[in-house]
């Protein structure tokens, strides 16, 4: 009986000691990433491939300000592509190619901070700013039609949902799904013959590759 009582005392002492050790063990501090970053955006959307660039500045672990600019083509939903006997692709009734160059300023808010691991940092973001809309005749290439290129001015912005990956303190890699909306101030642009567009709405899947410092 004395032996059992002695073992119980020893076992209790071990549990108490283990509990104290666990209480003294400090929690792991969240990873601190550099405040500044810049890089490029590879964009894939309804209008095709686009390319952009961005700069970012962190104000806190959850809030980041940014500016970005991109270049992509915007196609009318009524466009239908055909292929001739020689493999050339053409669109009947298309008047102009339309290109969007939005310059946006916005904020990015990190979700589930201190809940998910640093390998996955989801966020929501939104930006707003001026958009330059460039048109050129469909039947001529960009350089030979240089004197026929026209610039239109618009306002626009986007909202997005994305995530950054990895715990590197130098390389930034992420993915972002965005919806862009653009409104032109003039009569609009003529994608298809005699059909003018004053508004644009496009989804883009964007890959973000950059450097933090």
Image: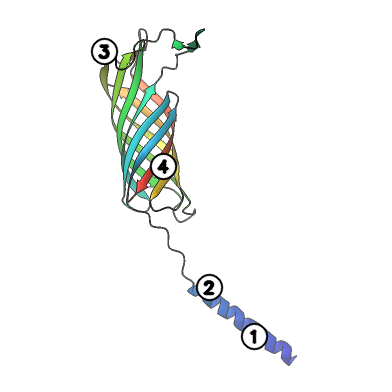
Q: Can you identify the residue that label 1 sits on? A: 10
Instruction: Calculate the distance from the C-alpha at mark 3 to the C-alpha at mark 4.
Output: 40 Å
Q: Which mark is residue 23?
A: none
- Depicted 25 relative to depicted 39: above or below: below
Depth check, front residue: 28 or 63: 28
Which residue is pictured at 38% across the width and 23% down the height?
73
Instruction: Calculate the distance from the C-alpha at mark 2 to the C-alpha at mark 4.
Output: 36 Å
Say which quarter of the image contains residue 183: top left
Which tag is nearer the camera, tag 3 or tag 4?
Answer: 3
Number of residues whose C-alpha sits closer than 10 Å to that of mark 4, classed few (under 14), some (14–19) or many (20 or more) = some
Q: Which is more N-terminal, label 4 or label 2?
A: 2
Q: Can you identify the residue that label 4 sits on? A: 124
Q: Which is more N-terminal, label 1 or label 2?
A: 1
Number of residues whose C-alpha sits closer than 10 Å to that of mark 1, classed few (under 14), some (14–19) or many (20 or more) = few
Q: Are marks 3 and 4 in contact (CB under 8 Å)?
A: no
Number of residues whose C-alpha sits closer than 10 Å to that of mark 2, classed few (under 14), some (14–19) or many (20 or more) = few
Q: Can you identify the residue that label 2 sits on? A: 22
Residue at the far bottom: name it.
2
Which residue is pictured at 38% across the width and 51% down the height?
170
Q: Which is more N-terminal, label 4 or label 1?
A: 1
- Depicted 189 relative to depicted 118: above or below: above
Q: Secondary structure at mark 1?
A: helix
Q: Can you identify the residue that label 3 sits on? A: 148
Number of residues whose C-alpha sits closer than 10 Å to that of mark 3, classed few (under 14), some (14–19) or many (20 or more) = few
Q: Are marks 3 and 1 in contact (CB under 8 Å)?
A: no
Which tag is nearer the camera, tag 3 or tag 2?
Answer: 3
Q: Quadrant of the N terminus?
A: bottom right
Q: Are marks 2 and 1 in contact (CB under 8 Å)?
A: no
Q: Secondary structure at mark 2?
A: helix
């Amino acid at each position: 009986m004395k032996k059992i009582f002695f073992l119980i005392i020893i076992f209790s002492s071990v549990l108490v000691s283990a509990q104290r050790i666990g209480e003294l063990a400090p929690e792991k501090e969240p990873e601190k990433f550099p405040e500044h970053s810049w890089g490029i955006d590879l964009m894939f959307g309804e209008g095709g491939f686009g390319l952009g660039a961005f700069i970012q500045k962190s104000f806190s672990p959850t809030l980041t300000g940014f500016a970005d600019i991109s270049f992509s083509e915007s196609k009318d939903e009524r466009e239908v592509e055909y292929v001739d006997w020689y493999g050339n692709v053409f669109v009947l009734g298309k008047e102009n190619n339309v290109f969007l160059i939005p310059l946006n300023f916005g904020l990015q808010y990190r979700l589930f901070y201190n809940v998910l691991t640093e390998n996955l940092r989801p966020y929501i973001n939104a930006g707003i700013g001026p958009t330059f809309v460039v048109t050129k005749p469909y039947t001529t290439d960009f350089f030979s039609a240089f004197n026929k290129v026209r610039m239109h001015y618009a306002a626009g912005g986007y909202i997005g949902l994305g995530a950054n990956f990895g715990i590197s303190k130098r390389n930034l890699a992420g993915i972002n799904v965005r919806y862009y909306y653009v409104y032109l101030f003039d009569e609009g642009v003529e994608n298809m013959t005699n059909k003018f567009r004053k508004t644009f709405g496009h989804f883009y899947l964007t890959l973000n590759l950059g450097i933090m410092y």
